[in-house]
Image: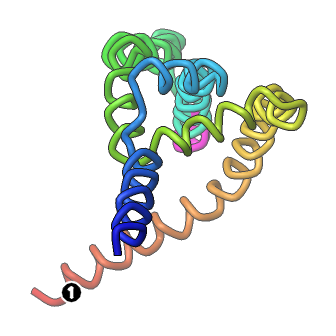
Amino acid sequence: MRKFLVLVAAAAWCGASQAAPPTEASINALLAAAKTDKLVDSFYTYVTQSMRQGMHSALQDKALTDAQQRALDAVPAKFEQVMRQELSWEKLRPMYVKIYQETFTQSEVDGLMAFYKSPTGLAFVNKMPIVMHKSQQLMQERFAPLAAKMNAAVEQAISEARAAK
């Protein structure tokens, strides 16, 4: 019986140690290895490009003066500047640390670190910006027809609502 209790206690201790929440230092190391700050930075660029293309697409049939065009051209850059200030990596990092601590165990963070230090993990991190860029391009190509369909659906709903009066 005593051996059984020792075995149960050892199993419980092992399970508890594996389920331990990760330390802030280990999460910071993981975020650095994954170059999460660079992914966040590329998000700003993506949003700016998307906004610029969306505005261009929405206004392509409109005749604008040079002053109007300059004012509209400045909007995406101003928007990006605000995003970079309000959603800077310095402000987002503590949020990521908290999410990772609530989601992963120390053992899982250690495993992820091992992956990111491996040749495959390094290739993944280094090639992810290329994957994101290509994904963004494809999504933008798909979004243009989708936006037209969405606008048509909204216009139809407004028309039906007016007719229902």
Does residue 77 appear to the left or right of 125 in the view shown? left
- Residue ID for mark 1: 163
Secondary structure type for disc 1: helix
Residue found 44% across the figure and 61% down from its top: 11
Asked if 162 appears above or below 106 in the picture, the reply is below
Residue found 38% across the figure and 42% down from its top: 20
Residue furthest to the bottom in view is 164
Give coordinates of residue 135: x percent, y percent. Answer: 74, 46
Main SS type for the magenta part?
helix
Total marks drawn?
1
Residue found 60% across the figure and 35% down from its top: 110
Residue found 58% across the figure and 26% down from its top: 30
Give coordinates of residue 35: x percent, y percent. Answer: 64, 22
Would you identify the image quadrant in which residue 119 lies? top right
Does residue 20 appear to the left or right of 57 in the view shown? left
Does residue 63 appear to the left or right of 127 in the view shown? left
Give coordinates of residue 140: x percent, y percent. Answer: 68, 47
Q: 35 or 117: which is nearer to us?
A: 117
Give coordinates of residue 152: x percent, y percent. Answer: 47, 71
Please say whether residue 156 is one of the residues in the magenta stretch.
no
Would you identify the image quadrant in which residue 6 lies? bottom left
Other residues around mark 1 within 10 Å, as few (<14) / some (14–19) / many (≥20)? few
Name the quarter where the N terminus is drawn.
bottom left
Tell me which amino acid carries mark 1.
Ala
Asked if 85 appears above or below 143 in the picture, the reply is above
Asked if 19 appears above or below 4 in the picture, the reply is above
Q: 162 or 38: which is nearer to us?
A: 38
Does residue 43 appear to the left or right of 12 in the view shown? right
Name the quarter where the C terminus is drawn.
bottom left
Q: 151 or 51: which is nearer to us?
A: 51
Q: Write down the region rendered in magenta.
A: 56-61
Residue furthest to the left in view is 165
